Image (cartoon, helix red, strand yellow):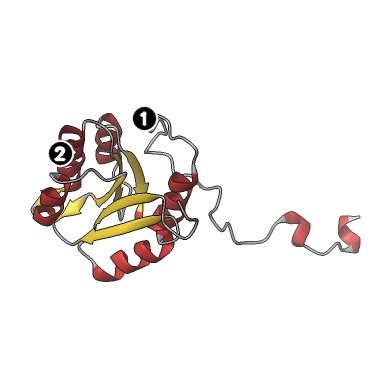
Amino acid sequence: MPESLPRFTLLLVEPSEVSRDIIRAAVAPLAQVEAHANFADARRRLAGTPVDFLVTNVRLGAYNGLHLVYLAASFNRGSTRAIVYSDQLEVGLGREAQLAGAFYELRASLPAALISYLQAATLPPHDRRNPSVRDRRATFRGGRRGSDLPLTSASH
């Protein structure tokens, strides 16, 4: 397969057009992205040819993105890896997503996380991270550190 072709197919379900465009642009070199704005269209798509990744917002109007995770598992017999995300930390939904076999992310970290998932040689069978603890490794900490302060004669 030529290097210029994406390696994966990714079904993105996101109501916001702006968010769909941001996520699509982030993963375009690694995946062929098919985006849908609503549950019904995504459900019909999942019933067809399997996709490698399902990436869904947990909030889809009257529906919940976790419904799509369960449908993907039943339609595709576990061949589709799922990533569920939300705007705010929702521990209960995060744990439910993990129990369904999905990875749980916050929208702010989603583009970078998707790149990591797509570049991984293999993914673990389950997301074992604690959804109540945010990963702060890439977070800007700001403020001053002791080493930033100038030495004064009083501190010698």
Which of 77/3 is in front?
Answer: 3
Total marks in image: 2
Q: Quadrant of residue 66?
A: top left
Where 126 sits versus 146, above or below?
A: above
Q: Quadrant of residue 130?
A: top left
- The amino acid beneath tag 1 is His
Q: Residue 85 shows which numbered tag? A: none
Identify the residue at the far front of this view. 1
- Left or right relative to 36: residue 110: right
Q: Residue 113 at what x, y percent from top left? A: 44, 50
Looking at the rendering, in which quadrant would you find the C terminus?
bottom right
- Whichever of labels 2 and 1 marks the residue nearer the N terminus, that label is 2
Asked which secondary structure carries label 1, the reply is loop
Q: Residue 88 at what x, y percent from top left? A: 31, 52
The alpha-carbon separation of the residues under discs 2 and 1 comes to: 17 Å
Where 88 sits versus 92, above or below?
A: below
Which of 60/42 is in front?
Answer: 42
**How many residues crowd around disc 1 within 10 Å: few (fewer than 14), some, or many (20 or more)?**
some
- Left or right relative to 11: residue 128: right
Residue identified by numbered label 2: 71
At 43% from the left and 39% from the top, the residue drawn is 133
Where 33 sits versus 84, above or below?
A: below
Asked which secondary structure carries label 2, the reply is helix
**How many residues crowd around disc 2 within 10 Å: few (fewer than 14), some, or many (20 or more)?**
some
Nearest to viewer (mark 2 / mark 1): 2
Which of 56/147 is in front?
Answer: 56
Residue identified by numbered label 1: 126
Q: Residue 139 at what x, y percent from top left? A: 53, 54
